[in-house]
Amino acid sequence: MAKFYATTPIYYVNDVPHVGHAYATITTDAVSRWHRLLGDDVHFLTGTDEHGLKIQRAAEEAGIEPIEHATKTSARFQQTWELLNISNDDFIRTTEDRHRQAVQKLLQKAYDNGYIYEATFEGPYCVPCEAYYTDDDLVEGNCPIHKRPVEHMVEDNYFFKLSAFEDQLTEWLEGDDPSISPTGYRNEALGIVKGGLRDLSITRTSIDWGVPVPWDTDHVFYVWYDALINYATAIGYHDDPDRFDEWWPATHHFLGKDILRFHGVYWPAMLLAAGITQLPQLHVSGFLLVGGEKMSKTGLNKIEPSELVEDFGVEGFRYAMLRNHSFGPDSDFSYEGIVERYNTDLANNFGNLVSRVATVVSKKCDGIGPAPTPDATLASQAEVAYREASKAWDGVQPSVALEATWRLIRETNEYLQETEPWKMDPGPEVDAVLGNALEVLRIVSILATPAIPTAAAEAWRRIGLSGTPADQRLPEAAAWGGYPGGLAVETGDPLFPRFKPSA
Ligand code: ME8
């Protein structure tokens, strides 16, 4: 069985989850669910990044210990992912013992292999980034990302010989494997490597909120070098090497473009330094923007995922996030965009198709769903939808996959509009039309499962099928003709009631 190990970034606990985090996690969840449909053995990891100065200061401001602060906020992330029906198999916190041990083991290996040395470091530091910059990186003396003043720091610390990996990283990035997608981000990482790599300061003595350096306990590892290792920790790097060896080659990191440098340059070099030569695949998204600015918890545009769930339901929110934002480029986020998408695709198209078909089956076929016909036009349209959706999910393009799926729904609504089964007399003609529409609903329920698993399962149940669409296996389950006919079809409340913004 093919393996698929999917990871989200682990989120900082200095503040609560926002829509940008939800976007990253929902995308990873949907792609993981797609791989489960393919029958892959999936391991899906998310978690929280709890060390570093940023967290230490946030805790000080709140007047509590860092661990207390981290535990509270980490719980907020876990609750949000539960609310959003995220199917993660594990949730890692970097303050866990399993993680401390893995960090120490991996970096000790890099040290033993001669890739870590001690020196004094001095330079501008941005606390929100948790990163040192050079004077050249700064924009008018400010952090290039946060546009805020930096702090001047002087520290004795350990350095990682990043400069030793220029050739290996270039080879990896230029190689045949799609190491980083979309390609623009691979080129960006390549540009960083080709621009020349300086060694990195990877430890701190100025703070103690971190993982101690095993060979010199006055130091803790700087938060990023601790954080990246979470991906190795969770699959047994420290305590179950066989498990690690099984999963590691199937690693897919999902991340935003803000942390490309860490994942596409530093992390692969750290792995190589520790003797891990198989490098992960990266899937990089752009930012959701509000009024042209990156959406964040500190911006004016702060919107909590739970507020959107209140208005659109879990699946309305999930669907709109996946469908409205093409994975890769920056994308404008708007509330109105969700309203429009929800009403058009979920209420008017999918929801309407489910109710319409059930109602006509109840009137014309005594509530018993007929079987589809083999030569229906819809059969070839369904085949195209499957082919396109499958290619798009494999290539981490949820918006394209859902568009292909919803095209089939629209085509089926049009088919009903043209054939008007509600005007037909009971008999073989109406049976054929409704059987075909039911077969589309069966296929669509499977294809929509990564985005809207609960509504898809409900549609599946209403047309009389047993089990759930998530239990089906692709590609076989998408083949035309799977709806057996003779099943009791249920009418019910609208799956997605039309949303009317309150005045
Ligand atoms: O960087 N649009 O954590 P973080 C789209 N702890 N995605 C967004 C977004 C937006 N406006 N804002 C955030 C960290 N994200 C580190 C990661 S991993 C070893 C350590 C998403 O809490 C996006 O995926 O700042 C981004 O990369 C991630 O949240 C950063 O989350």
Image: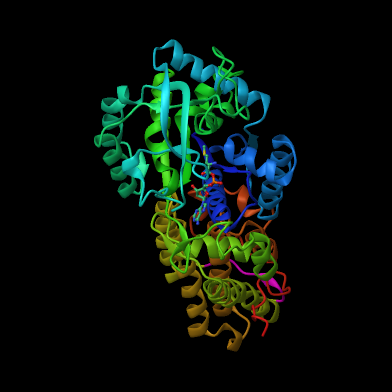
- In the rendered image of this protein, does residue 144 appear above or below residue 338? above
465 relative to 431 in the view: left or right: right
450 relative to 418 in the view: left or right: right
SS assignment for the magenta stretch, majority = loop
41 relative to 307 in the view: left or right: left
Whether residue 371 appears in magenta in the rendering, the answer is yes
Residue under the point 56% across and 72% down: 335
Location of residue 460 by image quarter:
bottom right
Give x and y (percent) for residue 5.
Answer: 52, 36
Give x and y (percent) for residue 126.
Answer: 47, 42
Residue under the point 67% across and 64% down: 309
Residue under the point 69% across and 36% down: 66
Whether residue 412 appears in magenta in the rendering, the answer is no
Q: Give the magenta-colored segment's residue range.
A: 366-372
Scheme by which the image is coloured: rainbow
Give x and y (percent) for residue 11.
Answer: 58, 44
- Specify whether residue 448 is in view: yes
- In the rendered image of this protein, does residue 196 appear above or below residue 464? above
- Specify whether residue 405 is in view: no
Give x and y (percent) for residue 75.
Answer: 72, 44
Along the viewing direction, whichever of 297 and 155 lies nearer the viewer: 155
Along the viewing direction, whichever of 496 and 258 lies nearer the viewer: 258
272 relative to 413 in the view: left or right: left
Q: How many marks?
A: 0
